[in-house]
Image (cartoon, grey):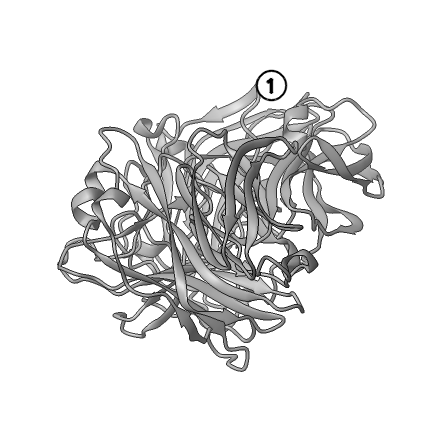
Amino acid sequence: MKKFYTTAGILLTAATVVFGQVASTERFPANKKNNHTGYHVKKQNQGVAKNAAATIWQDDFSVAANWTISNQSGNSDNWVIGNAVPSGSFPIDPIASTTAANGYALFDSDLLCSGNQVADLTTASPINCSGHPGVLLQFQQNYRRFDDSTFVFVSTNGTNWTKFPVNALVANNDDPINPENVTVNISSVAGNQQFVWIRFEFWSPSSYTSGPGSAPGCGYSWMIDDVQLVDAPDNDLVATEAISYAYSMVPSFIGQSTDFATLISNNGGQAATNAKLNVKVNKGTTNVYDQTSTPVASFASGSSDTLFVTAPYAASEVGSYSVEFTVSADATDATPTDNVITHNFAITDSVYAVDGGFNATVSGISNGVETGTTNSQPYKIGNYYEVTSQGDVTATSITFALVNSTANMANTVGEVIRAVLYEVDSTVTTSLAANEVAASAEMTIAQNQVTDLSTGTSFTYITLPLTDPYVISANADYIATVEYLGNSGGKQVFVATSEPSLYKYPGVSFIYDETATNPGWYYYGSSTPVVRLNLDGPIGINEVNALSASLNIYPNPSNGPSTITYELKENSDVMVKIVDITGKTVMSLNQGRQTNGVHNVSVDLSSLPTGMYAYNVTAGNFSATKSVIVK
């Protein structure tokens, strides 16, 4: 396992942990950022799906002679065409392209691993693009990056080549969906040309460095199939990636604000006039933000750029929000569906989350043993959180989602876990260092927490209260984790993940491996573990009399029986209510006269639709309200 190194803060790329095992793919990057200004919200296919435009040329790699294989490194690290699968020490899955059975092109950087790789795959014969002023190159790929770059080169004479970057937004260790549809606008070179050559290049020479810990010429793999040239429509802007709110759930007292930006590409054959970005933020059905970027007078065909809306936005009112990024220009767009990216987030009163929700097809991440061994591994899995509030903030508990399935029943019941909170040590600059500051008691997973399902997968939220709630330092960074302590050989605990996630912000998820050759923090993959930090914020004015500041609900989120806990400072008449986002009371529980002290009220939320609700406790003339999410 390779430990990451950094000069400051937190890095932006991730190792991969696969279902059922901790893969030996923890390769770590050198590119870095020191803050998390916002999610990178990508389209699900991270590119443009193949359109119905007229096909100029196509190739499915069923005839290897259609391509010329060469390299610029003076070694034998070359592309291969056929059905070979990645087979190095860190293999990724074979491409799941439309015609994979007929063969495809593979550059297995990991298998070859010479430390010096510049490998080319070029059309053996030129392609006639005469009469086609706008030309799009489209192909399917499966790719994972590690200290390398990928390019398309285009030539009209076989000697002089123009470079077009591919996968420029993919971070080290990130792995987009398989297969991924990629579109590159090559009109500026290929438009109306009688002779056009296409070249794919994997670039990772020994001279390449991305900083400390770089390892060029030994990445993962790049696979390509179903290549075609098609006519570009005159007008076709594409919203590729947006930057939005920094976490999926943010406590209101954190005070986090964001700017909005979107990377756009012009896949049309003509320049776009007055290209602009509009960003709308809605709280429920109410618009709370509507801003447009300064228009770009002429946005050239084949170009890409980032458009910014400069007015920042800070949501502070508890509720569910949606952000809509829309790019447009003066002319009618040929495919308006790819002009829009949407992103959802929530402002809560206590829950801090980075995960983007569940995907039922993903069973989760093993927090236990490595496949093929019987050794229980004390891994810790979790996420990175920035706490910028200057007020009194206390970490009270950590919530995670436990995967429920028939297959996991025997593995999980009886296993021992606990929650651990770490504060990042900003004085250490050579690697990520974090000090344990709080932990929960150990908990043994019970039978009733793992549902035996005949089909499908579900999740159980488990909240682990910290034994001693921890007062958060202002402007400090923390890692909230779930630790598997083990019980017997061969067992595992599966933490649910959000994959594929639109919130592609690698570097926020980590695993701590005590059993590695170099024990320490390792980057997690593009999937995000559902591990959330629960905070109590500054005490409100209406909570300091009859009600104390201890109002809470467990678990949160919930989809069934829950317990509301509150403390009375004096004897009071108490009413408990659950209220939906429209203000309608959906549940009312009169507790009558209660004495001072701690009280618990059981509520069943299973009948409520999914969404955010407020739970309110009124004691005499005083009341307190917090939110609960029903899943």
Q: Is residue 13 visible?
A: no
Left/right of residue 45 with respect to residue 514 in the rendered view: right
Residue 160: x percent and y percent?
62, 46
Q: Secondary structure at mark 1?
A: loop
Give the vertical position of 509 relative to 337 (above or below). below
Q: Nearer the viewer, residue 476 or 270?
A: 476
Q: Quadrant of residue 480?
A: bottom left
Give the vertical position of 458 relative to 148 (above or below). above
Q: Nearer the viewer, residue 420 or 547?
A: 547
Q: Nearer the viewer, residue 93 or 208?
A: 93
Identified at 49% across, 56% down, the residue is 595
Q: Quadrant of residue 152?
A: top right
Number of marks in picture:
1
Left/right of residue 576 with respect to residue 493 in the rendered view: right
Badge 1 amino acid: Ala
Image quadrant containing the N terminus: bottom left
Residue 303: x percent and y percent?
71, 41
Residue 64: x percent and y percent?
36, 33
Q: Is residue 276 visible?
A: yes
Identified at 65% across, 44% down, the residue is 242
Structural crowding at the residue carrying mark 1, measured as other residues with C-alpha within 10 Å and reported as few (<14), some (14–19) or many (≥20): few
- Residue highlighted by disc 1: 53
Identified at 83% across, 38% down, the residue is 298
Q: Nearer the viewer, residue 107 or 452?
A: 452
Residue 517: x percent and y percent?
27, 73
View extreme (bottom): residue: 427
Identified at 14% across, 58% down, the residue is 373
Left/right of residue 333 with respect to residue 102 in the rendered view: right
